Amino acid sequence: MPSNSSPLGALPSRFRRERILIVGCGDVGLRAARQLPRNARLMALTSSAARVPELRSRGITPLRGTLDDGASLRRLAGLATRVLHLAPPPNDHPDLRSDPRTLALLRALRLRGLPRSLVYASTSGVYGDCGGEWVRETRPVNAHTPRAQRRVHAEAHVRLFGRATGTRVHLLRIPGIYAPDREGGTPRGRLLKGTPVLRAEDDVYTNHIHADDLARACLAALWRGKPQRASNASDDTQLKMGDYFDLAAGLYGLPRPPRLARGSAEDALPPVLLSFMSESRRLDNSRLKRELRLRLRYPTVEIGLRDR
């Protein structure tokens, strides 16, 4: 089996020339690409001509196309032995609860030469509000927001694709991604703005994963992920949202954010931010550690935020 540090390291040489396609090659995709062995052929779908030089400079072959135009994806058929699907659903599609981008990708991959494995980056929002309870992957999905419902739709079709084709598909349910070297990847901006958080009695549990650990989880899932399986890609942190911002304020030497009652917050904060404050859950990451055999480099947000 692949080692924890190099997913391809222990494979027989005849299998080592993997062709890996990254769909949605943003920050996490680039981090994953950096951790792959040099003898793997890396490809990334991009709709932007401006990104072509950047991808080439990182040893990634750019493939021009867009998930919003199925015809442009035909060239993806048969190219990859493994696919990492990191692209989010559209926000402006007429059907707010479906993900046409994932459907378009799966149609293209079906044309010929199916990949051995496909990892889909979903969201922990598919569980909905769990009242602060511990959440394992066996818990039924109960998405409340259109954003999370689109992910439920995508998960279902990825699983159907796996059952129909034999491709080993694995879902990663991802919470808040952070990293000091990621754009907007720390609470510093919100702390500087003085954005309020909920008072302790109204507060919600949040979950986190460092971007580097998430990239490693993606690669582990590509090789070790059990078929038709989901894994919570979360660290070991158990903090409510306000406590998280208090912790960051202490690390950065900034004032703690003001605390509001939930009723006051509904008048003071934008709807998108409020939606994150309306769901509380604690993700059980046992599968991530046991089945994917991932050893977190940043097991808590305190360790991750200190690594600046």
Image (cartoon, rainbow, N blue to C red):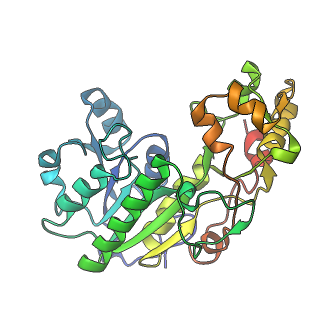
> Depth check: 3 or 89 in front?
89
Give left or right: position of 241 versus 114: right
Horizontal and vertical percent position of residue 109? 21, 62
Q: Tell me which residue sits at (87%, 24%) in the image.
A: 255
Say above or below: 187 vs 123: above
Q: Position of residue 43 (x, y in %)?
A: 29, 50
* Residue drawn at 51 percent across, 49 percent down: 145
Picture coordinates of residue 132, whole percent (x, y): 75, 60
Residue closer to the observer: 153 or 209: 153
Q: Locate residue 102 relative to residue 268 in the image: left or right.
A: left
Does residue 111 show up? yes
Q: Is residue 196 above or below residue 96?
A: above
**Residue at the location (71% across, 53% down)?**
298
Percent of width and height locating residue 123? 52, 55
- In this rendering, the answer to whether 223 lies above or below 22 is below
* Residue at image coords 32%, 45%: 60
Residue 50 vs residue 139: left or right?
left
In which image quadrant can residue 178 be found? top right
Q: Nearer the viewer, residue 192 or 13?
A: 192
